[in-house]
Image (cartoon, rainbow, N blue to C red):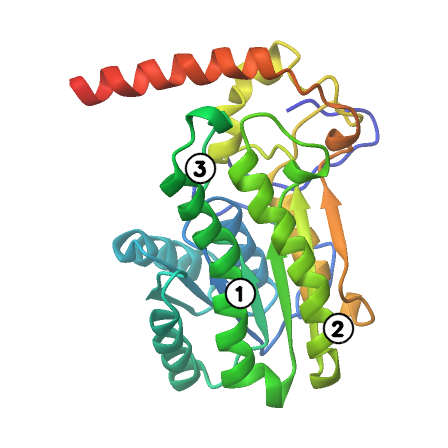
């Protein structure tokens, strides 16, 4: 990742591992004594959010469907930060699994202050080739999953105790991104949901905000954009800041929204994409070519 004079990027590693060192921008005690429930917390941006939160004194719950992966992630997070990380198996499409996990969290950790809705499903696919079920599945995970988890947390804890919700979105729907009608539609719905819930739940002391990342290194989306090779050949030159972001930068944005630093912010969408959605090319022909290549590669791998 390129770095210019005067630009000091936060530490990060591309893999789902904890950082060897961490430089604090905010007080190390910013989230001391708090508990965060993070869906999709076992990898990618969710993993880094959990790590940064724990480095600021927060205990975390990381929740997803792959319990073995969650246990491995939780061990890494606890070893690196000294904090407590509870892995819980959840399918955000099934409210009963969320309810069970929230009950377990309250039993083990006593309270919940923060919900991070990070669970998501996505892939590149043109609308004409997208099956009805594939569109439905992304909507169920991204949109229904966000509502399901938020509603369960609100009913079981936030309604009487207050809290913070941060939804992890995307900029896909801002201008109609090629090959992303499923994810773009789901995230646009979530952005609206953020505003509606902020209005309805504000009187209960619940703040609801959204963070919308752009291309972020060390994630599956970044790999699909060509990863380091794409950056090396200038794939990100159209972004005003001339680079992709990193997971720690996204975690810092979430830390801001979930903490007392943003105590009078609710119903907001914080875009963290280096200005990408304003200027980046939406070359549908090139994306279709990339999609065709990936589809052939996947079919060949299945055949083998």
Q: Mark 3 points at which residue?
A: 15
* Circle 2 residues within 10 Å: few <14, some 14–19, many ≥20: some
Q: Name the residue under label 2.
A: 199
Marks 3/1: CA–CA distance: 29 Å
Q: Mark 1 points at which residue?
A: 147
- Which of the pair 186/15 is nearer the observer? 186
Quarter containing the N terminus: top right
**Who's the residue at 53% across and 46% down the image?**
45
Residue 157, placed above or below residue 5: below
- Which of the pair 94/270 is nearer the observer? 94
* Circle 3 residues within 10 Å: few <14, some 14–19, many ≥20: few
Marks 2/3: CA–CA distance: 38 Å
Would you say 20 lies left or right of 130 here? Answer: right
Element under label 3?
loop
The image quarter in which residue 196 lies: bottom right
**Who's the residue at 73% across and 63% down the image?**
195
**Who's the residue at 61% across and 41% down the image?**
11
Quarter containing the C terminus: top left
Would you say 24 lies left or right of 73 here? Answer: right
Residue 50, placed above or below residue 36: above
- Closer to the chain start, of discs 2 and 3, is 3
Viewer can see residue 259:
no
Viewer can see residue 68:
yes
């Amino acid at each position: 990742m390129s770095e210019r004079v005067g630009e000091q990027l936060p530490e990060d590693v591309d893999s789902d591992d904890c950082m060897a060192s961490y430089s604090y921008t905010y007080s190390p005690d910013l989230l001391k004594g708090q508990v965060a429930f993070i869906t999709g917390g076992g990898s990618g941006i969710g993993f880094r959010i959990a790590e940064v939160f724990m480095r600021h004194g927060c205990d975390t719950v990381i929740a997803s469907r792959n319990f073995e992966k969650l246990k491995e992630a939780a061990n890494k997070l606890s070893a690196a930060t000294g904090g407590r990380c509870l892995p819980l198996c959840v399918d955000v499409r099934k409210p009963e699994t969320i309810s069970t996990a929230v009950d377990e969290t309250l039993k083990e950790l006593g309270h919940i202050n923060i919900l991070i809705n990070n669970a998501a499903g996505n892939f590149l696919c043109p609308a004409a080739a997208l099956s009805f079920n594939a569109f439905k599945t992304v909507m169920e995970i991204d949109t229904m999953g966000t509502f399901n988890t938020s509603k369960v947390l609100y009913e079981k804890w936030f309604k009487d105790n207050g809290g913070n919700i941060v939804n992890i979105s995307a900029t896909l729907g801002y201008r109609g991104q090629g090959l992303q009608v499923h994810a773009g539609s789901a995230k646009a719905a979530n952005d609206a949901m953020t505003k509606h819930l902020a209005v309805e739940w504000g009187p209960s002391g619940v703040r609801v905000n959204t963070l919308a990342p752009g291309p972020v290194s060390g994630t599956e989306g970044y790999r699909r954009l060509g990863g380091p090779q794409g950056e090396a050949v200038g794939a990100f030159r159209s972004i005003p800041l001339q680079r992709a972001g990193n997971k720690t930068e996204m975690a810092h944005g979430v830390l801001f929204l979930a903490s007392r630093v943003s105590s009078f912010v609710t119903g907001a969408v914080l875009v963290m994409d280096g200005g990408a959605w304003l200027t980046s090319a939406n070359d549908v022909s090139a994306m279709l070519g990339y999609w065709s290549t990936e589809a052939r590669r996947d079919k060949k791998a299945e055949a083998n």
